[in-house]
Structure formats: C-alpha cells, structure tokens
Image: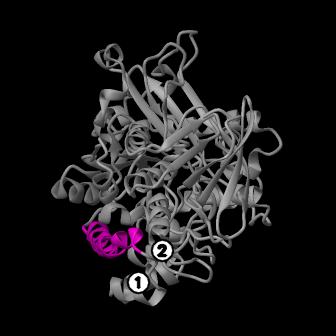
C-alpha cells in the first residue's frame, strides 16, 4: 500500500496490528466490510509475539505476553483459528523453609496429592479445606462473569444478580481483597499464593482502598469460566499469526511499516493520516478502531491525555541447558517449574516489597514467579535443543513500578535482576547461572525487560501491560454499550485500555467489531 496512491476509503481502518486489532479486522472482514490495518512496526502481534531473542539459538520464545486464559473459545471458533492451548497438570509450586528444612507447597497432580501437600506444610486439613471453599466460590463467579465479556456491558446490579452470591460479591467487588484472604486463610505462604493473582502488573497492597488489586484478581480467576491459565502451543506468536491469516483470508489489508499519526473526524466519518518510510498518506473510513493505549488515542485525536499509567513488573526470558535441582528434594523440578513457581511471595513478603517500592526503593526480596513453557509445549525449541534437554524459563517480577527505573534504567534493571535471581537461588541446590545456555557469542541466554523497556519497545504507557488500571466488567458512567466507545462517534478503542480489556483476550477487538456491525 504505497503512501502516494492517494486517499482510499474503507468501512473500517484499524490503528495497530496487535491481537485485538487483528480480532476486530477478522470479524469485520468476515462480515463483508472493507478493512485496513495500519501497523507501525514491521510485523503484527504487538506484545503477543514469538521471537528468537538469543543470537544463533533456535528457541522461539513468547517474548512479552506468555499465557492464555481470557481468550474466549467463541473467538477461536468464530474466526476458524488454527490455534491450540494446553493445560498444565501442576498449578503452582512455592518453595519455603520451615523448621530449618527446605519444603514447599505443590498444588496440582490430583486432589489427594494436593491435600497431602497442604497437610505437610501446614500441619492439618484446615488450609486445604479453606482453599477448596475459596476457589469453589471464585469458580462459580467465573462461570457467571466470563460469558458476559463478549456481550454488551451489563449494569452493575445486573452482574450482581447473575453472580447471585452476596459473600462472593462483597469479597471480590466491595472490600479490599486482603480482608477475604485474611478471613479465609491463616498460613502466611498460602495467603501469599492467593494474593499473587491480584498483583500481576498491578502495583497495589492487599488492602488498597482503590480495589485495583480486586480487579486484577477478578480477571485472573474468571478466564475461560474456570480461571485456568494455559500454554499457547507454538508460543504466543502462533495466536497472532493465526489471527493475521484469518483477517487476510477474509479480505482485510494489513499494512506494516505504516504509523498512524493523526485521526480527523466529523462524527460521520474519519480520515487517518499515516507515515511510512516513503512519506505520508491518508485513509478514509466510516469507522476507526484504535488498537493502542488511551494515551495514544488522545494523541491521535487531539484530545486531552488521560491520567498517566504506570507498569510495575520485570519480565525475564531465559534458556537453560537443564532445569536446576531444588533444595526441596521431594519435588521433581519438571513438576515444580511446569506450573507457577512462586518466589518470595509469602503474604508478609509481598506487603514488605510493596511498602519498600512505594517508598522509592527496590524491594530487598523481590517477589516473582516463573514457569517453563517448554515442559508443556516443546515445539518452541529446535529439534537439537529439545533432544539435548534444553528448557525455557519465563520470570515475571512483581512490585517493580516504572518510577524506580526513571533515573538509571539499565543500572536498576541489572540490580533488580541480580537480587531477583538471588531469591530463586536460595531455593536451588545449584546456582541458576550454572544452568543457563549460551548464545552464539558465548553470552548467557537471559534478557530482562523493565516497564521503561516496554514503553520504548511497544509504546505501552509507563510500561503498563494493561495500558491503564483494569476496569470492572460492568457499565459505569460514559463506558458506552460495549465499553469501546469514545467521545467521537466514529472512533472506537479496541485495545487493552477498553473496558474489559487487558491480557491476551481479543475481547476488546471482538466488542469493537460488534459495536461497528450494530451501527450499519
């Protein structure tokens, strides 16, 4: 699509070729609409991509986003996607030390095994029974809330009636999550494991009055109607590749290397000015769907910018020659790393880390969690690596707000990475460094990304993986019918910053497409 071909008119122009934009493009094109996708980078996918980050190493990693829970099967079916996920037999392993001995909590491998693991750690049945009740409650909420994500926004009271459980409503929607966690569980480590789902990419305390932690927790326990987090077969790029193929097959035009720089609208139609290596061009459309942050939307339309967003995570990708042995010899590393491996995530540890970061200091014991994609899906490794027993590790660090990196991003990144890996090493029978693979230049296969790195690489505002604070999944003032509407009639927000956005879900893309199709 050369920039000098003059203005062309489409039913819809989509700004941004991330997964949500591709979902919208595929739905609209399949409905017979003419669609143009403008993507700034030389490839589609946004944060949902697979790359080979280590020189000369045939390992295709999910570089940014990495697990799938919130993607409705409805979208996969509707668009005929050739995309699969695999469940994990182990939910989590959390190492600790009690009575001077290394031990831990393994959740998964069957009901009996999990019950016994709780009893060994806590000395009785109480915590496991509380766990069953608590997650039975969240499971019932998930069954009722998840299907609403691809429907017009329910009113608050309508969603409350659907849930039909006042105890659950109070615990998840009205009181700080810390209240329910402390009322339900007594063991510090168990409390911490529960709380972690409230802190993924969210800088908050268990008792934060904003309830940001509650909203984060809600989205982490409702996915798929079950709350399970699955491994994308072939890596996250397999999803966006399938979406791009579906959109193109339906007739959508995807133009990479095309950066949208302005959106002009009169309420009836719009024009998108874009820039390429060869100059500028203009595309006209009845509807413009912006698959970018609310800040980027404001910049394109000339509206006042919303409140600044701030990310709060450290993302680390690694390739290992072998999985490290654990100090807790009762657990096979192949099980411990298959699920979520929690590090320094006891309840008090999480509170301390938050308080230290809020005071402007790096946490002394940085909390993080790890999982091994290749144990569940070895297809991301070249045949030679898989045969030699190589494995991937993905680490996601909590309570690392962007403000901590503002003065010296490179230096603070290295300091935080060292202290984070030291927390992991404390539970290993051998240093992680001894297990790291090396690339073609002899360098360890490890890379770390701070919020500022994500802002630079992907234009995530403040490095916030959700674009802004997550929203409640019900209608509020000015949210519109689908949660994607803006103050401009022909302009919709279909990125993670839409209501019910965040995560690899495709929900904002679906909902923006439905909003367009309802109007014509």
For the residues marked 2 and 1, what is the alpha-carbon distance in whole angstroms? 9 Å
Is 264 positioned to the left or the right of 339 in the image?
A: right
Q: Position of residue 263 (x, y in %)?
A: 72, 56
Residue 356 visible? The answer is no
Q: Give me the disc on residue 473.
A: 2
Q: Residue at x 69, y 52 (%)?
A: 272
Contact (CB < 8 A) between labels 2 and 1? yes
Element marked by disc 1: helix
Residue 95: x percent and y percent? 41, 46
Image mark count: 2
Predominant SS along the magenta part:
helix
Quarter in which the N terminus is drawn = top right
Against 434, residue 185 (above or below) is below
Mark 2 crowd level (few <14, some 14–19, many ≥20, 10 Å Cα):
many
Image check: 315 left or right of 387? right
Percent x, y for residue 260? 69, 46
| Magenta segment | 125-151
Front position in the image: 481 or 411 = 481
308 w.r.t. 344: above or below: below
Image coordinates of residue 56 in percent, x first then y, are 50, 12
Instruction: Determine the residue located farthest toward the right in the rendered image.
Output: 407
Residue that badge 1 annotates? 159
Q: Earlier in the sequence, mark 2 or mark 1?
A: 1
Residue drawn at 67 percent across, 36 percent down: 5
Q: Is 101 left, or right, of 217 in this rendering?
A: left
Helix or strand or loop: what does disc 2 sit on? Answer: loop
The magenta stretch spans residue 135: yes
Residue 62 visible within the image: yes
Front residue (pair 453, 296): 296
Q: Nearer the viewer, residue 20 or 53?
A: 20
Task: Based on the picture, tell me whether residue 195 belongs to the magenta stretch.
Answer: no
- Neighbour tally class for label 1: few under 14, some 14-19, many 20 plus, Cα within 10 Å: some
């Amino acid at each position: 699509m050369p920039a000098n071909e003059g203005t062309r008119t489409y039913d819809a122009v989509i700004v941004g070729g991330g997964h949500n934009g591709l979902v919208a493009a595929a739905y609209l094109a399949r409905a017979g609409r003419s669609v143009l996708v403008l993507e700034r980078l030389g490839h589609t996918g946004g944060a949902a991509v697979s790359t080979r980050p280590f020189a000369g190493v045939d390992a295709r990693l999910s570089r940014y986003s990495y697990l799938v829970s919130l993607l409705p099967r409805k979208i996969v079916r509707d668009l005929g996607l050739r995309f699969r996920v695999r469940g994990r037999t182990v939910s989590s392993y959390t190492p600790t030390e009690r009575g001077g001995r290394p031990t831990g909590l393994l959740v998964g491998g069957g009901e009996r095994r999990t019950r016994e693991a709780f009893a060994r750690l806590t000395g009785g049945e109480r915590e496991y029974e509380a766990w069953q009740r608590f997650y039975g409650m969240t499971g019932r909420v998930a069954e009722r809330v998840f299907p609403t994500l691809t429907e017009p926004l329910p009113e608050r009271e309508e969603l409350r009636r659907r849930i039909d459980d006042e105890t659950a409503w109070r615990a998840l929607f009205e009181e700080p999550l810390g209240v329910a966690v402390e009322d339900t569980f007594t063991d510090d480590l168990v409390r911490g494991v529960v709380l972690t789902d409230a802190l993924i990419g969210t800088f908050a305390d268990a008792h934060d009055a904003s309830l940001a932690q509650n909203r984060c927790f809600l989205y982490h326990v409702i996915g798929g109607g079950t709350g399970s987090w699955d491994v994308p077969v072939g890596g996250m790029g397999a999803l966006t590749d399938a979406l791009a193929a579906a959109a193109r097959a339906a007739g959508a035009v995807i133009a990479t290397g095309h950066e949208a720089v302005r959106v002009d609208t009169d309420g009836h139609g719009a024009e998108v000015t874009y820039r390429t290596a060869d100059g500028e061009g203009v595309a006209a459309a009845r509807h413009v769907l912006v698959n970018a942050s609310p800040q980027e939307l404001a910049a394109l339309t000339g509206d006042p910018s919303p409140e600044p967003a701030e990310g709060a995570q450290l993302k680390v990708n690694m390739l290992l020659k072998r999985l490290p042995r654990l100090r807790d010899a009762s657990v096979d590393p192949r099980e411990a790393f298959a699920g979520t491996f929690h590090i320094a995530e006891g309840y008090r540890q999480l509170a301390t880390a938050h308080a230290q970061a809020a005071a402007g200091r790096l946490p002394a014991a940085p909390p993080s969690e790890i999982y091994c994609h290749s144990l569940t899906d070895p297809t991301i490794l070249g045949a030679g690596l898989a045969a030699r027993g190589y494995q991937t590790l993905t680490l996601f660090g909590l309570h690392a707000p962007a403000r901590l990196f503002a003065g010296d991003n490179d230096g603070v990144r290295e300091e935080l990475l060292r202290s984070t890996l030291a927390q992991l090493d404390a539970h290993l029978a051998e240093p992680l460094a001894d297990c790291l693979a090396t690339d073609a230049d002899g360098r360890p296969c490890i890379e770390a990304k701070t919020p500022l790195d994500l802002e630079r690489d992907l234009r995530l505002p403040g490095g916030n993986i959700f674009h802004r604070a997550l929203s409640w999944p019900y209608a509020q003032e000015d949210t519109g019918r689908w949660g994607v509407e803006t103050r401009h009639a022909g302009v919709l927000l279909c990125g993670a910053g839409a209501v019910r956005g965040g995560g690899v879900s495709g929900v904002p893309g679906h909902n923006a497409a439905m909003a367009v199709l309802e109007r014509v």
